[in-house]
Image (spheres, grey):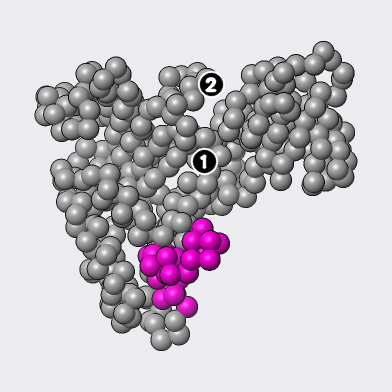
Amino acid sequence: MTLTLQPAVQTAPTSNEGQVLNLQPNQVVQATVVRGGLDKAELELGRHRFQAWTKVPLTTGQSIKAQVTATNPHIELRLVDQSALMRMFVALHRMSESFDLGRVLTQTGVHQALNGHAWGQSLRQALLQAAQSSPADGTQLTGTMLSSLIKLLGLDTERQVALSDPDQAAARLKSALLALGREQGQSQDVRQRAEALVNHLELFQLCRVRMAEQGLNWLPLPLPFLQQGYLVWHIDPEDDTNDQAGQSGMLRMVLQMTHLGDLDLKLRPMHQGLRVGVACASQETASFLEDRKEELIHSVTALPVLECQISLGAKDPSRILLDMAVSEGERVFEARV
């Protein structure tokens, strides 16, 4: 639902009300309802009060979270649904479980169940081809391969259904797993495995929804050489008007590997090349990568690496994900007795 705001107190007209609060498109803000109403309310936002025209009732004292959709000529906000965030919290423990797609497709009862259907055989073959094109050491991994793999997982299944394109939705792993879970003839083991995999895919979807609310793109990296991994980058890298920490245009890769542990890679555009920062969780890993820095630099082929810095400070990918999902203003203290 969208809210349209105008100053509650008559002031000199401005060409852009968003400038009063230095608001930027896609920014998520917190506001308090100081006077509720069915279609009109008064909000306090950044020490300023605004009249809000709304299609949903607002209650006095209510705290709302909204995303800025427009700043000119009036401020427009879209109410942010917190249910996705809460569901993500509940499911976040699954992030520590490796999503081993190759094993699912070759060593579990799920692959046999898929082979029992013509559509299942086609999907499994496409997934195997995408997974096998990403070798265990990642040396030949390309953006095209990764895009194909992500598409086949079915993270856009609901969107395809909403667009009335059932054929596209059916040709996805999530749809196939949902179908297997409903089949009466399948064993309990296959149903449970299918349900667990669907839950993992839905965690990926929840992460994408929450990161989009924060103005970020998020993609999982379900690759055989990773225990955990994902990519993060700004939805609008060209818009650096609110780039307080030099994050605009940065591609962040958060990984957890069997032998190297947690790694946090940040790639930033720099003139005609890249500036690369690699944070490690241990001094042993940092020393290992420092000794092989030249090899690491030459492994990046898209653009020349002009600067590469290796340091400490990497954290568990789940912890970083949680830090990104919950802004500083929303942090709460949790105590358990």
Q: Main secondary structure of the magenta part?
A: helix
Q: Magenta stretch: residue 112 in it? A: no
Q: In the image, is 175 to the left or to the right of 146?
A: right
From this viewpoint, is residue 312 visible? no
- Comparing 195 with 16, the one in front is 16
Task: Identify residue for label 1.
Answer: 212
Q: Residue furthest top?
A: 12
User: Could you tell me which secondary element the residue under label 1 belongs to?
Assistant: helix
Task: Identify residue for label 2.
Answer: 242
Percent coordinates x, y for residue 181 in the rendering? 44, 75
User: Could you tell me which secondary element the residue under label 2 belongs to?
Assistant: loop
Q: Residue at x 17, y 27 (%)?
A: 297
Question: What span is colored magenta in the figure?
Answer: 158-182
Q: Residue 147 shows which numbered tag?
A: none
Position of 66 relative to 11 (above/below): below
Q: Residue at x 15, y 43 (%)?
A: 139
The C terminus, quarter of image: top right
Q: In the image, is 283 to the left or to the right of 172?
A: left
Kind of residue at disc 1: Ala
Query: Disc 2 versus disc 1: distance between alpha carbons?
Result: 16 Å
From this viewpoint, is residue 127 visible? yes
Percent coordinates x, y for residue 124 in the rendering? 28, 69
Q: Residue at x 52, y 41 (%)?
A: 212
Image quadrant assignment for residue 263: top left
